[in-house]
Image (cartoon, rainbow, N blue to C red):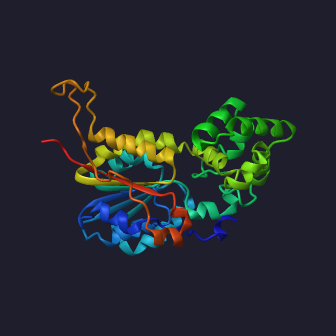
Amino acid sequence: METSVEFKHVSIMVDEVIENLDIKSDGIYVDGTLGGAGHAWHICKRLGEKGRFIGIDQDAAAIEASKKRLAEFGDRAQVVRSNYCHMKDLLWQMEIDKVDGILLDLGVSSYQFDNAARGFSYREDAPLDMRMDQRQEMTARDIVNTYSESELYRIIRDFGEDRFAKNIAKHICQARAKKPIETTFELTEVIKGAIPMKIRATGGHPAKKTFQAIRIELNQELAVLQDSLNDMIDLLNENGRICIITFHSLEDRIVKTIFKKNENPCVCPPNFPVCMCGRKSKGKVITRKPIIPSEKEMEENPRSKSAKLRVFMKKTEE
């Protein structure tokens, strides 16, 4: 079923990303979430003969689609199937020590949402899957049917930020005691039963937050981001930039906090006349406030509405 669905993904804030990456024709650029190579194509287009692009994605369909899209750039564009958390090691294997720009466009691609068989969408009935990398054995079905009530409560509360997390976890455990929950629609029905009718009528789709929570837990999205960002900043050349597009407050908070700490890592008490901890700034946050899509883009692509772009530039202290 999967191969019959064409890989389509509308890239978000392309102009803003390209402007903020400040691309040099002979630079080295990495896209850690390649997708269908929407942003990547625009980056490669600006590279000269000495420029180099490395695209990373863990989704087989994304790899296939992006290889076709970037074929015109020949050896300048290299595509690797992996998770961006392995970026440092992958670059080391390619004998690349530093790069001039890194892009992450987080979350789920339109293709993954629209391909019902992947089980990301609560609007289509499909087996509970949600794996970004289908080589992984564990699926969303395993989380829904094997996590304890307290574990389900924790992830729905923390990753879904759903105020009915406790009740949803309880309802899931009650339902699966009768029979395993196998599909997206079965799970959606259970969630609906845990949320008061008047809230369901006004509060958006009742399953949205729980689906987000399960997907984040399964793919370890926040942990990977949290554990990889400092390394990525260290990979940048002087004046190199990292651009990150997030789609919900949890991701955005991690990016904002880590960028801020890299700009001002000093842990000395405010009353110290001089810094004694010796922690030096690695650069500066270019975006004091996140960049958001234009009204026109939000209108044309409703999925862009929650997107935020933050940018950090590497600067070594004199």
Q: Residue at image x 34%, y 62%?
A: 53
Q: Is residue 292 above or below residue 281?
A: below
Residue 84, position as x, y percentages in the image: 44, 49
Which residue is at the far bottom? 72
Residue 75 visible in the shown view: no
Between residue 115 and residue 246, name the one nearer to us: 246
Q: Which residue is drawn at 62% across and 37% down?
A: 157
Q: Which residue lies furthest to the right in this view?
A: 178
Q: How many marks?
A: 0
Quarter of the image where the C terminus is located: top left
Q: Which residue is drawn at 41% across and 42% down?
A: 228
Q: Where is residue 45 in the image (x, y as percent from the top left)?
A: 33, 73
Residue 137: x, y in percent?
64, 44
| Quadrant for the N terminus in the image | bottom right
Front residue of 227 and 122: 122
Instruction: Find residue 192 and report its horizontal and vertical position in percent.
Output: 77, 48
